[in-house]
Amino acid sequence: MLSPLHLAPLYAFGLPRVRTAQGWVVGSRAADGVERFAGIPFAEQPVGKLRFARASLSEVPFPGGVHDGRLPGPPCIQNPAGPIRAPGSEEPPQSEACLHLTLWRPAASQEPAAPLPVMVYIFGGGLCGGSANVVSLNASRLVVRQQVIVVSVSYRLGALGFCPLPDFPGGGSGGMNGIYDIIVALRWLKANVAPFGGDPGNVMLFGQSSGSYAICTLCVAPAAAGLFSKVALQSGPCLGGPPGRGWGPVTSVSPSAIAREVMAQLNVTSGIEGLRAVRDATRIQWPSRYMEDLDVAPYFSAYFPDDAVVRSPPADLWAAGAIHPRAMLVGGTSKDGTAAFYGTAPTLGNIAPDPAQLGDAAYETALKGAWGAAARAVRAHYPLSRFGGSAQAAFVQADADAYVLCPQTEAARMAVAAGVAVWHYEFSHFMPSPTAPGGGCDNGVELDVVEAGASATWATHGAEVRYVFGSEQNHDTLSGRPRIADCPFSPAERRLSDEIGAYWAGLAREGDPNSGGGAGGGRAWWPAYGAGANWTSLVLGVGGGVARAQLHGSACNFWTQLGGESTWSTWSAVINRTSRAGGLKEAHPG
């Protein structure tokens, strides 16, 4: 924030400025023709007496009538509370005062006469970690090449964002406060994006992993209706896995039991007021020790029933067709599982290659750990002979199919049945994992026993995000310590990024990824999913998109039939056992 004394120097610099309901926002201008307005507070900050309060639009004028938007706001407090800042990063330390957004737009001299479509990104991190400010989310190239406005939103995480409280004021439980934060950000944009050149009536949400899952919930939340009309769901299964068994909201444990456990760990006996009195907010978390006895999976910080957002489980509302956006992209990556984050895959994340972990015994152990009595059936459908004898390759594919790809496919078909225009994709381009030579450019801990470049189809969880944004840097938190990794695109990868950006922007602009405008012209035609009863997906990789019918059809039929034997509670128990054994990696699934 700025005092009036600082206002004149900022204006003298010729920096871009926009007037909002709270006052002026002064931004920065990059050489690539993009203007960025960072760290804009969209809500009353949830500190002091507002800790755990449901967010409300900020109506307080900026101090001195102006907000300095040259640097980003702080990320929300993480779970675990370890650092995510990288040397050279402009991101400030974590804070409770974190409800802010950053907006990128084409420089004023490049703006067309008509308002621009607005693309709002929701970051992933298991609802317990992550940041809207990391370098892989630099939207400059996407904004310039596609002539759109891009916004990234920060929201509360972990217990501070999703802890249900029996004495929550104003009704509900507070168990979806982090989701409600996003609703308030969308309300702020509806009221304020027009002066930035955006169209408040043409807003698209896109997000990856838990960011996508949050959007799945917003798609059926009455309070979010009318705030956006299109979505791109990237690797965040609306229904969880296996098909039909949704992640949260958690109903197997009462909200009061969760609240009592959180308070007991802090020696708090006076409910919400006692929690608000805790001086160090980083202590208000739920690492695995809070959740093991409650059978709730750590690092998937599932939320809890909260009538302020939805009155029924989101998966039930999807099945009932209560989906309010009318156009969506849905998909994932070719090896989109997250098992290796939890030590249940044949290889743990970030370890040296170990050939002993590739064989039959390792496969048997992993299958029994993940699927118990169903392991024999899973092995029959995923025999090692299909995967060159590699237990890692077989297990990662089974994990991806069961927990991301097939649930995403089922959600896409539910949306089609509800009359939504749907396009389904799979991103297949490989980038090396953090421990591979030249690593740090992908989120792919599953690939640690595969030499860099050995496969063009092992794209792992989160691999597509940089290609959507066009960012040639990555915020690497998996290679030992946070760092910014330079990840230059090859010419073919740059074309792939432009094509993906054009598809996403096409949906934002006109509700159809095939619509014109922006870079990426000449890209493959993307058939609508379910058109003429033809379930055709577009596989995205270098060399252009390739249409594939009935993608993973056999696998998804298998998991649907197996659904009664493999449940989220079983998966949760596997994760908790691994955590107690010391195998849990301190990395977020996305």
Image: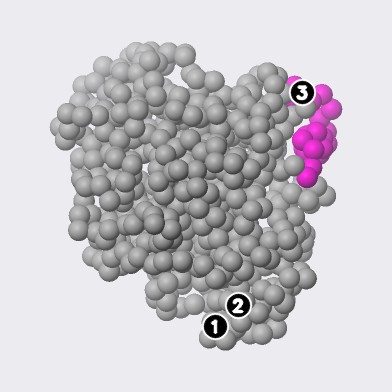
Q: Which residues are magenta?
A: 252-276
Instruction: State the residue position of label 1.
Output: 386
The reply to whether residue 476 is in sight is no
Q: How far from the left and from the top, in percent, is residue 466?
A: 38, 54
Q: How far from the left and from the top, in percent, is residue 305?
A: 69, 35
Instruction: State the residue position of label 3.
Output: 167
Q: How far from the left and from the top, in percent, is residue 186?
A: 45, 29
- Quadrant location, the N terminus: top left
> Taken as a whole, is the magenta stretch helix, strand or loop?
helix
Cα distance between the residues tagged 2 and 3: 49 Å
- Residue drawn at the location 79% of the way across and 42% of the way down: 253
Q: Nearer the viewer, residue 439 or 220?
A: 220
Give the amino acid at mark 3: Asp
Cα distance between the residues tagged 2 and 1: 7 Å
Give the amino acid at mark 1: Arg
**Is the residue under label 1 in contact with that under label 2 (CB below 8 Å)?**
yes
Give the amino acid at mark 2: Tyr
The numbered dot on residue 382 is 2
